């Protein structure tokens, strides 16, 4: 089969999907939908139709699946149920507290239309969620840990940029090495927020801004920074652009348990990601689950799913016999 | 629900299953079947019936699932299809080359009886296979690596013990640190067998045996040792028993890929296990998949499956809403 994929929203993530599709010989990009003027969108590989988002319903028989690349704050809560009226859809909705509500809205839209939706796809939520589930099922009495980084947190970078006097900023989330070591040794530490991660901020000041005042505002910002050991470095725009323009990220999921009649045997599961490009990796996961959504739909499995509900084999273009032979 | 589990075969793995069941509040051990005299089997937690394997069919309405804990060489190829006539079954069949044949035999027996079987469950095959599949689906152009160890290889230890003059032996498989480092750096090395693992042998000689001759026979043994850098240490039985009687194992699955228009962004996935007890960990995985087999059966999904075919959510005693809230 050749999987005909449409993208909705052409930012970093949408562009990542365009590139990820190129790595999958069984998939092709068939259209990009945008709320901007289609003429304003310059694809990495031109030649694919760029279409106004409002015209998407006319494409309902020309695409197998839509990958929704909008933001979780305002785009996806309306877009995913909306497009599920006509398409199988996959999104990367990541506002944890609103996942149950988003799931219900997408589920009812998709069921009505006999479509298949997979939400909250990516690495966290996504591959990390899977690993938390597998680990918890295998070591039910164990302790689970998730660490993030080293990587750029978009939300924290944005929060710094909103401080008066700040021209630009990037924030790195960094796991505390000693905490990682303790978990790896099976010590099952109880870790506070401060003991798990540090935050490193690279800040470009506007001319005349008060550095000490900006640093104080960052370090005392509730929720974002006050519970962490935070370091602030003031740099030039040139340095920020030259050395910190990438979007690296990653992290670790651990499960540390013990088995045996007296719990005498330590068992450690560790999963980690080291990503030069967070959006391109998330996009790669989205494409794999787009394939799964189409296959589930062909089997008559309708409604909303998450990565927890999808059997791994659905992600691969290969059939069961080939997978058993090559991967088991 | 309370999952009523039966064990067939009470060696290291069967005993591991007995212990693993204790960690799962929704499961209980209901019977242990043995080909030995039932009186000869001493459970870790006595009180559960120990029954002659021949009498198992009489238990068909009293159990939800059987976990088969025999060996892959001669037990499971006949036992798994045999018991699938009456029970949902889970096994840890790990003779890679014979998996397709075993799958077919189990599949036809289970379908005829409307039972559900999950074969080749454990960590490799098992959790490592899952990770190879997820990694390959997400980074289809990437390179995949599997390393094993540091851990005891039962097969290699047995091979040494068959050499004349050897009284006892343990063999550790050890990944080469430089190879792991190179993969972690995203260098995508091409590695020979010798470059990936070394083998360390602890050997107890029989009185009067020729150490040099034994060492030569080990190091030149085809398939087992000749393609590896092998170290042989001669030790006393006392030292072997005191310091090397455990069954530790583990390993690593890596996927190293690149994304971006020109492949400029490296993306690394690493999964690793560090296990103090190989059989107890395998047993823990078996219990999670036993739960899945019972649920699939209740949904009318019959025949043979592998870990690749089972959606992660089936492994957990929690329902979809709880899993989405806690793990996504």
Image (spheres, coloured by chain):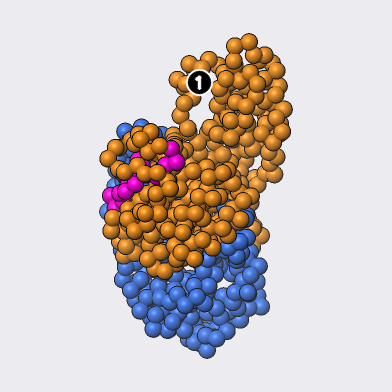
Chain colours: A orange, B blue
Q: Which residues are magenta?
A: A18-36
Q: Residue at x 52, y 48 (%)?
A: A76
Of the pair A139 and A282, the residue shown nearer to us: A282
Residue A20 highlighted magenta (yes or no): yes
Q: Residue at x 46, y 54 (%)?
A: A83
The answer to whether B31 is drawn above or below residue A255 in the figure is below
Residue B163 seen in this snapshot: no
Rendered location of residue B225, percent (x, y): 32, 50
Rendered location of residue A2, percent (x, y): 28, 55
Q: Residue at x 54, y 50 (%)?
A: A78
**Residue at the extreme top:** A208
- Badge 1 marks a residue whose secondary structure is helix
Count the marks. 1
Rendered location of residue A72, percent (x, y): 55, 45
Residue A25 highlighted magenta (yes or no): yes
Give the left or right position of residue B152, taking residue A143 as reference. left
Of the pair B257 and B181, the residue shown nearer to us: B257
Residue A48 seen in this snapshot: yes
**Residue at the extreme bottom:** B58
Crowdedness near tag 1: few (<14), some (14–19) or many (≥20) residues, C-alpha within 10 Å: some
Q: Quadrant of residue A200?
A: top right
The answer to whether B11 is drawn above or below residue B167 in the figure is below
Q: Residue at x 28, y 49 (%)?
A: A25
Give the left or right position of residue A117, taking residue B186 as reference. right
- Location of the N terminus of chain B (image quadrant): bottom right
The answer to whether B89 is drawn above or below residue B127 in the figure is below
Rendered location of residue A60, percent (x, y): 37, 57
Of the pair A143 and A303, the residue shown nearer to us: A303
Of the pair B313 and B220, the residue shown nearer to us: B313
Identify residue for label 1. A240
Give the left or right position of residue A140, taking residue A251 as reference. right
Instruction: Output the chain of dot 1.
Output: A
């Amino acid at each position: 089969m050749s999987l005909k994929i449409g993208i909705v929203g052409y930012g970093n993530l949408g562009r990542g999907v365009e590139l990820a599709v190129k790595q999958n010989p069984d998939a092709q990009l068939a259209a990009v939908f945008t709320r901007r003027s289609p003429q304003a969108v310059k694809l990495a590989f031109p030649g694919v139709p760029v279409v106004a988002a409002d015209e998407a319903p006319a494409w309902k028989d020309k695409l197998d699946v839509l990958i929704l690349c909008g933001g979780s704050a305002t785009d996806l809560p309306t877009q995913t149920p909306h497009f599920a009226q006509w398409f199988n859809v996959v999104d990367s909705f990541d506002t944890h507290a609103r996942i149950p509500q988003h799931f219900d809205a997408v589920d009812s839209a998709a069921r009505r239309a006999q479509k298949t939706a997979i939400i909250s796809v990516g690495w966290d939520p996504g591959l990390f969620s899977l690993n938390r589930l597998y680990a918890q099922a295998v070591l039910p009495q164990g302790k689970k840990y998730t660490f993030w980084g080293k990587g750029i947190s978009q939300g924290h970078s944005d929060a710094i940029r909103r401080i008066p006097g700040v021209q630009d900023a990037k924030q790195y989330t960094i796991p505390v090495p000693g905490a990682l070591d303790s978990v790896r040794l099976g010590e099952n530490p109880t870790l506070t927020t401060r003991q798990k991660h540090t935050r490193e901020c690279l800040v470009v000041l506007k001319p005349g801004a008060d550095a000490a005042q900006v640093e104080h505002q960052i370090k005392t910002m509730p929720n974002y920074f006050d519970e962490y050991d935070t370091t602030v470095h003031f740099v030039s725009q040139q340095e920020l652009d030259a050395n910190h323009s990438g979007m690296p990220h990653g992290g670790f999921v651990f499960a540390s348990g013990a088995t045996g009649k007296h719990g005498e045997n330590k068992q450690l599961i560790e999963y980690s990601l080291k990503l030069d490009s967070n959006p391109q990796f998330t996009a790669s996961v989205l494409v794999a689950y787009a394939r799964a959504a189409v296959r589930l739909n062909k089997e008559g499995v309708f409604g909303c799913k998450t990565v927890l509900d999808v059997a791994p084999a659905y992600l691969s273009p290969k059939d069961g016999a080939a997978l058993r032979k090559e991967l088991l």
